[in-house]
């Protein structure tokens, strides 16, 4: 935040199972807003972006970040 001059941070996740609970508690304790993106919305946005149904760990974070910034 100091480097870019930003005043707030948002963390976006696609909640699957219970794996995000510890991260969510950690971020909440630090006052960081946690935004959960519906897995179905991620799938739909990904298909609209590149017309591909493939799921991979390189593409998903970009799609999630885009959904978080767009609201």
Image (cartoon, rainbow, N blue to C red):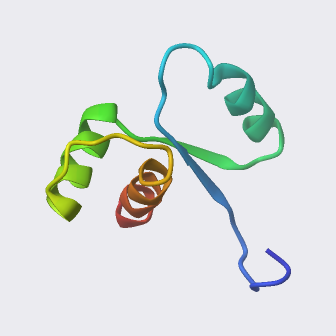
Observer-nearest residue: 28 or 11? 11
Position of 17 with respect to 25 (left or right) is left
Residue 35, how many percent across, how many down?
A: 51, 44
Residue 34, how many percent across, how many down?
A: 59, 43
Observer-nearest residue: 41 or 33? 41
Residue 20, how many percent across, how many down?
A: 62, 25
Residue at 85% across, 79% down? 2
Quadrant holding the N terminus:
bottom right
Residue at 40% across, 63% down? 66
Position of 2 with respect to 25 (left or right) is right
- Numbered disc total: 0
The correct choice, above or below, for 60 with respect to 36 in the image is below
The correct choice, above or below, for 67 with respect to 8 in the image is above
Position of 18 with respect to 45 (left or right) is right
Residue 25, image quadrant: top right
Residue at 83% across, 83% down? 3
Quadrant holding the C terminus:
bottom left
Residue 21, how many percent across, how many down?
A: 66, 21
């Amino acid at each position: 935040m100091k480097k870019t001059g930003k005043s707030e941070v948002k963390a976006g996740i696609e909640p699957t199972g219970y794996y995000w609970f510890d991260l969510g508690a950690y971020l909440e304790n630090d006052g960081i807003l946690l935004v959960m993106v519906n897995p179905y919305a991620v799938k739909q946005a990904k298909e609209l972006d590149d017309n591909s149904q493939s799921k991979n760990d390189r593409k998903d974070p970009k799609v999630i970040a885009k959904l978080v910034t767009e609201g």
